Amino acid sequence: MRSLALFFALVIAPCLHAQQACTRPICNVSPDSLQLSSLIDFNDVTSSIGIGSRIDEVLKRDGAAFGERFIGQTRHAHGDHDVISGAPILPLTLRDGGRGQTLGAMHLKGSIVLHGHGHRVYPKVEAVGEGSVAVLFDRDQPALSFDLRGGEQGFASVIFIRRDGSTIDTHTLGPLGEDSFGFERKSGQPDIAGFILLNTDPQGIALDNLRFDGFDLLG
């Protein structure tokens, strides 16, 4: 009995405390704690060496699509970086950012990663990784995870959006390096329709290995 009490005190109780500690609408969790069945890794996107390729249209993949922002929102600039403001209009729809200001793909440490091109316009180096990336899922999600690549101790923000265009929660991430992040909706509500990824990293950041579709509480 004493051993069981000790096990609870040392192992189970801290886990319960960690679960209860998050009172936000969306909790930042370990990606390894999530059981996610779908993966988009961008390795099928055509790219080139150096600053990579330019993607001027909305990029569609199985289960999700990628653009600059949602229709109804406005893009501004803060230094080299994109700032997105305003509420989307319905139906929730992605839009591009214009020629050389939407998305890009590049080779980074053996993988192809996706990033936003900022207002400096590709192929200027100052544009690469500085732009926003908006993601829209085909169906609403209760959890997701992704990798952020190329960080140089800057910060990113993730704005989670419902299908009706309202904001669920906003997370600030950083200081950034080569990092993985997991996010889980409080009580498992499947209502994350998409998100917008912004950053203020000195060299910009890229998105890789987007996982979605479900998590352990669904089974």
Image: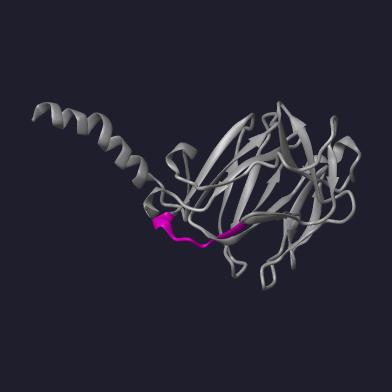
Relative to 45, residue 85 above or below: below
Looking at this view, name the residue that lies furthest to the left.
1
Relative to 106, residue 133 above or below: below
State how many labels appear: 0
Q: Quadrant of residue 34?
A: top left
Could you tell whether 81 is left or right of 146 in the image?
A: right
Does 74 lie within the magenta span? no
Q: Position of residue 44 (x, y in %)?
A: 73, 42
Q: Position of residue 63 (x, y in %)?
A: 61, 56
Q: Quadrant of the N terminus?
A: top left
Q: Quadrant of residue 150?
A: top right
Looking at this view, name the residue that lies furthest to the bottom.
90
In this rendered view, identify the residue nearer to me: 211 or 172: 211
Q: Residue at x 78, y 42 (%)?
A: 130
Q: Residue at x 69, y 56 (%)?
A: 65
Could you tell whether 35 is left or right of 105 in the image?
A: left
How is the structure coloured here? one colour
Q: Position of residue 162 (x, y in %)?
A: 57, 64
In this rendered view, identify the residue nearer to me: 55 or 13: 55
Q: Quadrant of residue 209?
A: top right
Q: Tell me which segment is drawn in magenta.
A: 186-194
Q: Residue at x 91, y 40 (%)?
A: 123
Q: Residue at x 78, y 36 (%)?
A: 106
Relative to 186, residue 128 above or below: above
Relative to 170, residue 107 above or below: above
Q: Position of residue 206 (x, y in %)?
A: 71, 39
